[in-house]
Image (cartoon, helix red, strand yellow):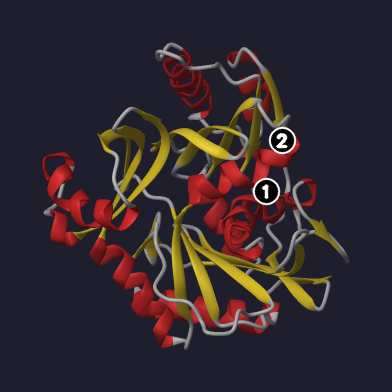
Amino acid sequence: MGHEGRTRRMAKTIVALEVTEESVRAVELSRGRKPHLIAYGEVPLPLGAARDSEVLDSGAVAVALRQLWTGARFKSKSVVLGVASRRILVREYTTQAMRPDLLREALPFQVQDLLPVPASQAVLDFFPLSQNGDQVSGLLVAAVADNIEQIIGTLGKVKLRAQGVDLAAFGLARVTAPLAAPDETVATISIGDHTTQVVVSRGGIPQFVRILPIDVATSASRRHAIEANADALEYAAAGNGAGLTRTRGSVRTAVSPGVSDLAARLRSTLSFFATRPGAIAPSQAFVTGAGAAVEGVMPALNAAIDTSVSMVTVGDVIGMTGQPPALETALNLVGTVGIALGEARR
């Protein structure tokens, strides 16, 4: 969604960070043609500290970030921030083809009527997909500027700096691309406790994005389990760094009442995409995010979605050494790695 600035000398590693309702999590990758996972970590947040990618209690999030950087031993304090919120607008948009710099200047005036807030209060980005004559079509992304600035301000409290902001769904499309054929259309679904992201992509290029407010986890019991294990930290070596996860015990044993709703809405979302003019239905679906570990989710999706459905963990998408993360963390970090890959391969 844009960059806050680049360092004069490119760092040897890249860190991607996500702030969710449940936790702060980050990964550090080496740069190059074959990035490697060097370090990773996830630290739970107190109830009410954040919602999606919005900081509600800056102090509490800052404490978690400090703990995350200390425990995972990240080398860099410059991060790419991944955002995923129900308040972020992602929609198809067609405009006149022009130079990228001119489009950036014209976009706020063109899309004002589509935004829930004044254009001056939004962070805008346009991801071009195709051009027909003098018209270019793509995905318009709009986030509330105050929300992004609040996260950046919180990072500053612990001497971290956001070098860029990326839509988490774009990272999901990027990270699962090597798992499919180059011209294959696939769906990547990241199931969180409160928000589910769906991106349909081809060759790592997103064609369609939906962010669904679906609660599949028994959040109260999950929160209780996290707090009960608050002092049980699990460290796992990952290259030169250390992975930090919370031991969560039997957090994922109860079947969520939202599972059937999740399956129905995902089926509906993918069917909607497939009926669009010129659309090619996904030939397989990759499922990740901690919500994928909720009992009954994968069987429900296999029954509801008319294509191959498979669970993807971080070990499936990037090379790493040492002990792999616990299952929930391994699922959550897939999208975070995708965010980092946008910079790591530069």
Q: Secondary structure at mark 2?
A: strand
Q: CA distance from mark 2 to mark 1?
A: 8 Å
Residue at 29 percent of width and 63 percent of height: 147
Residue at 42 percent of width and 67 percent of height: 3
Q: Nearer the viewer, residue 10 or 165?
A: 10
Of the two numbered discs 2 and 1 on the same chain, state the one appearing first in sequence.
2
Q: Nearer the viewer, residue 121 or 62?
A: 121
Residue 11 x, y percent position in the rendering:
63, 80
Please determine whether, in this image, residue 284 is positioned above or below residue 83: above
Question: Which residue reaches farthest front?
Answer: 133
Residue at 55 percent of width and 16 percent of height: 281
Q: Which mark is residue 311?
A: 2
Q: Nearer the viewer, residue 182 or 324?
A: 182
Residue 63 x, y percent position in the rendering:
48, 81
Please determine whether, in this image, residue 274 is positioned above or below residue 226: above
Q: Quadrant of residue 298?
A: top right
Q: Which mark is residue 38?
A: none
Residues at circles 2 and 1 in contact by the CB criterion of under 8 Å: yes
Q: Secondary structure at mark 1?
A: helix
Please determine whether, in this image, residue 242 is positioned above or below residue 166: below
Residue 186 x, y percent position in the rendering:
61, 28
Which amino acid, by three-letter code, is at mark 2?
A: Met
Q: Which mark is residue 331?
A: 1
Residue 233 seen from this side: no
Please determine whether, in this image, residue 13 is positioned above or below residue 36: below
Left or right: residue 41 versus residue 325 is left
Left or right: residue 44 versus residue 115 is right
Which amino acid, by three-letter code, is at mark 1?
A: Leu
